[in-house]
Structures are given as structure tokens and as C-alpha cells.
Amino acid sequence: MIEQDKSGKLQEMSSIRKSYKKFLILIFLGWFAFALWAQAASSRDKLINFLPQIPGWRLSQEPEFYSPENLFEYIDGASEAYLAYDFQGLIVAFYKREKDREPVVTVEIYDMGESLKAFGIYSSERPSEGHFLQIGLEGYLEKGALCFLAGSCYIKVFSYLDEKEANEVAQLFGREIARLIPAEEKWRDPAEIFPPSGLKPRSIKFLLKNFLGFDYLHHAFLASYEREGETFEAFIIQAKDASEARSLEARWKKELALSAEQSQEKDFAFQAVNKYLQNVYVTRHDSLLLGLMRLRRDDDRLARTFIREMISVINRKF
């Protein structure tokens, strides 16, 4: 009888523990769903205030809102790129004039949460050449399509009129939107942290995650250069602190060495040579990893000089 009683109590306790675990899981799922809803609601409330009200123009229908969960419904095939930069929400609005039967302007405002993340997705789509404008932080215009940065948002305005009028209308909407979006005080132009000599205009990109396919390398800036008849790319990877930078440096050097045709530590940087990155030089400065890659030939003099310039610029700006 005693053994049966103990067995019954153990089964009861096990059942209670299982019920408690299920309860905790339900609580967590409920909290997570609420957090997602609150984030989407917050983004929607913010973005609705950035829609322009321009005399002679009106909304043709209620604006559409997309969250991280359903962004694919609007930009299927491209949504993953936006989600990689911690996309928060998108508002889409359609405008027309009294004389228009159908909407002739579409406004898309992507809330990326931070200016740097907005710059990241913008820089991934920005052409190397184009008609660039001083609108918001930066923008470019092409055949009635205006794309630009403002605050923590990436904005696209599409005008479906004849090209001359389309360009004028797109800029009219864009400048009003840029006026409505508050600037971020902490924004720093990424061009300020790279040496200016040889830097190709508007070549700087920001990658929030998975730099060069390495999932542990994050917050990376990449810029294209041409010097002394050589083309190459420079990078700056921002770790949380010096300790994480040391860890990332050791891990990356190890992986580079494993895939390299040859590698060695030099007095100013670690060098590896492989088929994809060509000549790559990596060093650490405080909480940053920096260097250059895709240098076609082994050129320690150029690499040493350039890395010294990078560190000098960084020391002045930070």
C-alpha cells in the first residue's frame, strides 16, 4: 500500500510539472505574440505620420501596412533582404489628383528601426552611378522613381506620369516626406570613417549580419577603392568591445588560413591568399577588425600604408 501511495504521488507530481511547463510555454508564446503585435502597432503609428498631405493630391484608398510576418506578400522574393536588416514595418500609400481615374503615385516607407540599418538596405540597392539628390540623408532619381534615406526610414516614391512630370512629382512627394521624418542625432556618415584618397563615390555598404558568409561577423562596412592602378575593397567590422574583437579576429584568421593557398602573420596584419578574396589583410584596432581584400597582387607596401591611414582616420573620428 505504501509503495502504491508513493507511486501515485510521483505520478501526480509529474503531471503537475508537465502542466506547469505547458502553462509557461503558453505564457511565453502569448508574450511573444503580444510583443510582435506591439512592435507592428508602434511602427504603423509612426509611419502613418510620415505620409504627405499635398495640395491637389489625395489618397485613393486606405494605406496598406506590412509587418515582418507578411512583408513577403508585398515584395515576395526581396523580403529576406529587408528582414536581414531588422525591418520593422512598411506603409504603402497610393495617391491621385482629381483628374486621375487611377492612382499615379505610390509611396513606400520602410521603417528599419535605425538610420544605419536603413542605410544598409539602401546601400545594397543603390546603383554605382545615377542622378543623386540631396534629399534626406541621400537619394537618387531614375525615370520617376525616387529612393532615399531619412531618419530611420528607407523611402521609395514611384510616379507613373510622363518622365519629366513624373520626376517633378516624385521629388515633390519625397521632399515633403523627408521634412516629416525626424533626423537621428546619432547618425554618422559612413564615408567619414574611411580614408578619402581613392575611395569610389557611393561605394560604401553596411552589412548587419553574415559578412562574406561568416555568420559570426556582423556590423561590417565595406568600401571600394582604386589606388596606384590597383582596385580593392576595404572593410571595418565593429564588435561589441575589444574582447569580442579579439575573439572574432582569432576565429576569422583560423578559417581564412584553412581555406588559403598561403597565409602568414606580418608586422602590420595577417595576410591570406585565396581564390575568392585574393589577397586579404586583417588586423584589429580596439573593438574593430579592419583591413583590405580582393587585392590582385601581393603588395605589403600598399596594404601597410592603407591600414595605417584607416587607423589614423578612425582615431580622429571616434
Image (cartoon, helix red, strand yellow):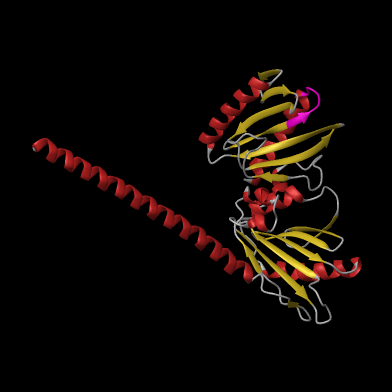
Answer left or right for 105 relative to 25.
Answer: right
Residue 189 visible somewhere in the drawing:
no
Look at the image and give the residue range highlighted in magenta: 293-299
Tell me the quadrant of the picture where the N terminus can be found. Answer: top left
> Residue 200 falls in which quadrant of the image?
top right
| Residue that appears at 69% across and 23% down | 271
Instruction: Establish if 189 lies above or below 175.
Output: above
Coordinates of residue 61 in the picture (x, y in percent): 70, 75
Instruction: Establish if 286 lies above or below 134.
Output: above
> Residue 283 falls in which quadrant of the image?
top right
Residue 306 within the magenta-colored segment of the rendering: no
Residue 45 visible somewhere in the drawing:
yes
Residue 298 within the magenta-colored segment of the rendering: yes
> Residue 74 falls in which quadrant of the image?
bottom right
Coordinates of residue 210 in the picture (x, y in percent): 63, 39
* Residue at the left extreme of this rendering: 1
Tell me the quadrant of the picture where the C terminus can be found. Answer: top right
Q: Nearer the viewer, residue 305 or 186?
A: 186
Answer left or right for 23 relative to 158.
Answer: left
Coordinates of residue 50 in the picture (x, y in percent): 66, 69
